[in-house]
Amino acid sequence: MAEGDNRSTNLLAVETASLEEHLQGWGEVMLVADKVLRWEKAWFPPAIVGVVSLVFLTTEQQQRFHEICSNVVKTRRRAVGWWKRLFTLKEEKPKMYFVTMIISLAAVAWVGQQVHNLLLTCLIVIFLLLLPGLNQHGIISKYIGMAKREINKLLKQKEKKNE
């Protein structure tokens, strides 16, 4: 087990060094972008929304939009962990999985029907750009904590009814 961890750590170090070498000329730009995405100034979130909105005001930017979507797809590796958790839920609690999937798919279908595709895509991109800042300022943790408390209350109520 330790050998596998060591190997993974070494592979990560090699990939990181290679990426750093490849992006050497972009270091300053990436540092500024990191500050903006983590909202180090209070005016960064409105600026992000404004810039993204300006980009989406014209349809001439379709090629750039395609590149953005391509970059989003590349983050697929991060979603693999969530995907594995979903399958664990499917195996351990199939009824909960079924209800969760039905509700999720119905919500996605409803939103997709109600909102124009370009606007929906613009909102998704805005959310993804605001995500690092939301995480940095603890906003995501706050609302996930609230959701967990509500789910736990519901589960406790269900357990009391079953007793």
Image (spheres, rainbow, N blue to C red):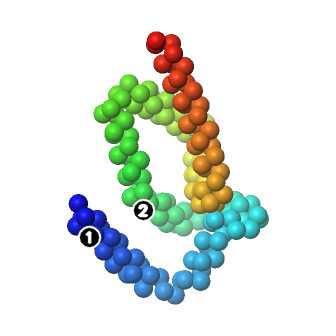
Q: Amino acid at mark 2?
A: Lys
Mark 1, secondary structure of its residue: helix
- Binning the other alpha carbons within 10 Å of mark 2 as few (below 14), some (14 to 19) or many (20 upward) gives few
Number of numbered discs on residues = 2
Judge whether 107 appears above or below 158 on screen. below
Q: Spatial distance from mark 2 to mark 1, Cα to Cα?
A: 23 Å
The numbered disc on residue 74 is 2
Residue at the image position 74 percent from the left and 68 percent from the top: 41
For the residue pair 103 and 59, the one nearer the viewer reads as 103
Q: Earlier in the sequence, mark 2 or mark 1?
A: 1
- Give coordinates of residue 156: x percent, y percent: 52, 23
Mark 2, secondary structure of its residue: helix
Query: Which residue, given by chain and number where applicable, does mark 1 sit on?
Result: 7
- Give coordinates of residue 12: x percent, y percent: 35, 72
Determine contact: label 2, label 1, CB under 8 Å. no
Q: Amino acid at mark 1?
A: Arg
